[in-house]
Amino acid sequence: MEQKDRKSELVRLQDQILRCRSCREIFGFEPHPIVQGSCNAKIMQISQAPSKTVHETGRPFNDASGRRLRGEWYRISDEDFYNPDHFYIVSMAHCYPGKAPGGGDRRPPGICSERWLLREMELVDNEIYIIIGGVAAAFFFPREKMTSLAFENRQINGKPAYVLPHPSPLNIKWFRDYPEFTEKRIFEVQKEVHRVLGISP
């Protein structure tokens, strides 16, 4: 598909996503789909679902997790992160799913990734994938453990893929158990992000 066709198809798809309210009854509140990125984005970043803060602001990763991701892990500016030609920022669910009865956020409904995400992946001509968190990792690499995925280079659709644990402050135990991630592995991913975006060290 030519670039102009991909661009127009993605714009139409994003408009459909923004108008989607399929999960209103499941959530019990008005869904707020989040869409960020262009068909030329160099990095496609796929996580679990927007947080409550993102739901309220409409800006992806505009929370403590995002600050850690941009500032400590990628070490890039907000301008680079939110540049639609740099990052296509998407999740298994485009909307904040609400709180689970037992605490924490609900798991994202599977219908969202099946209806929207897979089509977005077809239309975005990215160079690499970054997969964030166990839910997203399990979608692409079922029956594999985060403890292995986070330290290995993988591929999705023939393109390099890097799996990261969720940068949430609530994920502190994982980082305590696997200090080599923040001591070494994240710098390998960071170097690849800088290379793809053309950022000098």
Image (spheres, rainbow, N blue to C red):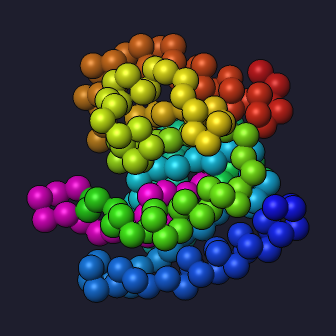
Q: In which quarter of the image is residue 88?
A: bottom right
Q: For the stretch drawn in magenta, what is the main secondary structure?
A: loop
x 76%, y 59%: residue: 39
Q: Is 166 situated above or below 124?
A: above
Residue 21, given in percent of the width and then of the height, sits at: 43, 85
x 78%, y 37%: residue: 197
User: Is 92 a magenta residue?
Assistant: yes
Q: In this view, does 197 lie to the left or right of 58?
A: right
Q: Is 165 situated above or below 176?
A: below
Residue 165, given in percent of the width and then of the height, sits at: 40, 35
Q: Give the range drawn in magenta.
A: 89-104
* Outermost left residue: 102
Q: Quadrant of residue 140?
A: top left
The N terminus is located in which quarter?
bottom right
User: Is 128 a magenta residue?
Assistant: no
Residue 19, given in percent of the width and then of the height, sits at: 55, 85
x 49%, y 21%: residue: 152
Q: Is residue 157 left or right of residue 8?
A: left
Q: Is 4 situated above or below 45?
A: below
Q: Is residue 19 visible?
A: yes
Number of marks present in the image shown: 0
Q: Which of 6 and 150 is in front in this view?
A: 6
Residue 50, given in percent of the width and then of the height, sits at: 44, 61
Q: Which of 37 and 53 is in front in this view?
A: 37
Q: Nearer the viewer, residue 8 or 41?
A: 8
The C terminus is located in which quarter?
top right
Q: Can residue 75 be seen in this view?
A: no
x 68%, y 26%: residue: 192
